[in-house]
Image: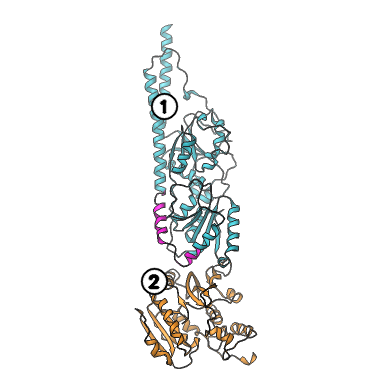
Amino acid sequence: MLEKQADNIHEIKEEVLGKIKKAISQLEAKENKIYFFCMDSKGRAMASIATIYEHAKTLKELGYNVTILTEKNDYTKPGSWLGAEYDELPHESSESESTIITPQDFIILPEVYGGILEQLKTANCEKVIFVQAYDYIFELMKPGETWGQWGVRKCITTTKSQEDYVKNLFPNVDTSVINLGIPDYFTPTNEPKKPFICIHSRDARDTANFIKSFYIKHPFLKWITFRDMRGLTRQEFADSLKESALSVWIDKTAGCGTFPLESMKCGTPVIGVLPTLPAEWINEKNGIWAQNQITLVDTVAGVMKSWLEDTIPSDIYTEMEKTVKEYTSTKESQGVADFYEKFFQERINELTLAMTQEEQRVPTKQPEPSGYNDPIRKI
Amino acid sequence: MKDITVIIPIHTNENKELKMLETALGSVNDQKTQPEMIYVVCPKKLEKEIKKLDFGKLNNKIIVNEGDTDFASQINLGVEKTSTEFFCVLEVDDELSSIWIKNVKEYMNHYEEVDVFLPLITNVDDKNKFIGWSNEPVWALNFSEEIGHLDLDALLNYPNFNTDGMVMRTEMFNDIGGFKKNIKLTFIYEFLLRSVFMDARIMTIPKIGYKHVNMREGSLFYNYKNHPDFLVNGEDAPFWMETAKKEYFFTEDREIEVKKL
């Protein structure tokens, strides 16, 4: 009787060890699925979505098992504005019956979806919050709710200032920075620039109000053309920035500021409203940063006149170049690769430790099922 | 490198123009990129005095016009003597901005098909107070067929363009017949109409390249308005506008029947 019980315990132990070994080998072979939960751009260019796809594409190229997870079946892939190659990444919808998230999987959730963590609590997978816009962290979260209570151990963000902000809010969440990479099609052109001003604001009303106010207050500059950057493909976006003399950025709640970095990479000086949480790349030398949104039109008019007179200090162009050197696609890819390599290794180390403990354990009772025995669940 | 000769026409015999000429020459000397040559085209009477002026490092030549010394004749003679591929017009009472020639040379390299580069002109009054700009409308959206470039339709709808500071292909100027001295008041407009009609590519460089003093006492347009020898009254303006629109088809400077006035 006792002999039979000992055999059973041994078999269970072997089974557990086998599962752990399998989990380790899956991680080593990068077979675990990494789901990037992504909002629908509905065909409009969005920097945050571009970054998610960039991370996913980088990991795919590195051999990881990556899937873009969409909220609904009816989803517009970003190929039309981001590039056809991004449509080729595997996509799954959370509405689809065939989409299953297993405990071995990873899910990367944009900060705005913090509220669906509760729905994911039974899916015992690894959850990572991706903060690109700190202002949306609490968008769907209930008062008093934290990420930690839903098993979030890690967070990725795009600037040091956002990292500090997140660490302050959720000190138990391991937060890392992966700098943005501005693609190489954002490059300066040798052609002389044209008297155009690119304008980009979070709220479309700010763009309309700015342009109207500019023309009223500075009628001598009525011939200057503004380019609202909404609705352009990434290539058109880059082409517009390249040929324009200046760009205007209005986004008080910006997390990183992709637009000004893209502008700088195109050699186009930026006049912007200083965000509430300025990214570490913003300094007084690499752009013209205003505190007051109301008087921004006057600042822009002044800088435009300087451009017409060739009196914009050359230092600003040098500083712009220096700033964007830190935000290359290569560095971003390396950041993504390092993060996930380290993350996978941590999981492997945890499992190796669990295996060692399991091997050394003298069973006194039937082992409890680990998370690896949990049933597969849908979101 | 496409070379440029700056031509300064002096069309009166008044010594007070020499003081202004010094300022104009200074503005050429201050160029971040120097032109290859500067010509001063003057009446015989002023030759000696002009020779005494400081031309700095500029390669210069004084051309005496012993015939008619009106603005158009002075420019036409200057261009006739020019051996560089391009020339630039600088009125004696005006100034080039220090970035003009540098910008022209940069734009020439990128817009090789362009025959005439117009500057953004800052117009000031005789107290140096800003009045407005000229030549900028081509950069307004939908003003012309190609943004930044002037075409016939746009010019027929909006005549207020100015050739001050323009840098033009010498050969093209000679081919189309130069300025017409028989046309008063609208000779610049007629010249631009004729240029685009004869397929000259005209663009405005969106950089401030020239400072023009509007209606300076003794200037050509001041005289048109105030001097008894030149007087053109307000009622004559439509006539000269119509004349420009009739004459731009012809390269020849035809006699104008001013009796119609």
Query: Which amino acid type is shown beneath numbered disc 2?
Result: Lys
Q: Nearer the viewer, mark 2 or mark 1?
A: 2
Up the image or down, A316 lies above or below B134; here it is above
Q: Is residue B235 magenta?
A: no
- B48 over A318 or under it: above or below: below
Q: Which residue is painted at 50% across and 77% down in the image?
A: B212
Residue marked by disc 2:
B32
Q: CA distance from mark 2 to mark 1?
A: 72 Å
Numbered disc 1: secondary structure: helix
| Farthest left residue in view | B57
Q: Which residue is mark 1?
A: A22
Q: Amino acid at mark 1?
A: Lys
Tell me the subunit letter for badge 2.
B
Q: Secondary structure at mark 2?
A: loop
The residue drawn where x is 50% and y is 88% is: B70
Q: Which chain is cyan?
A: A
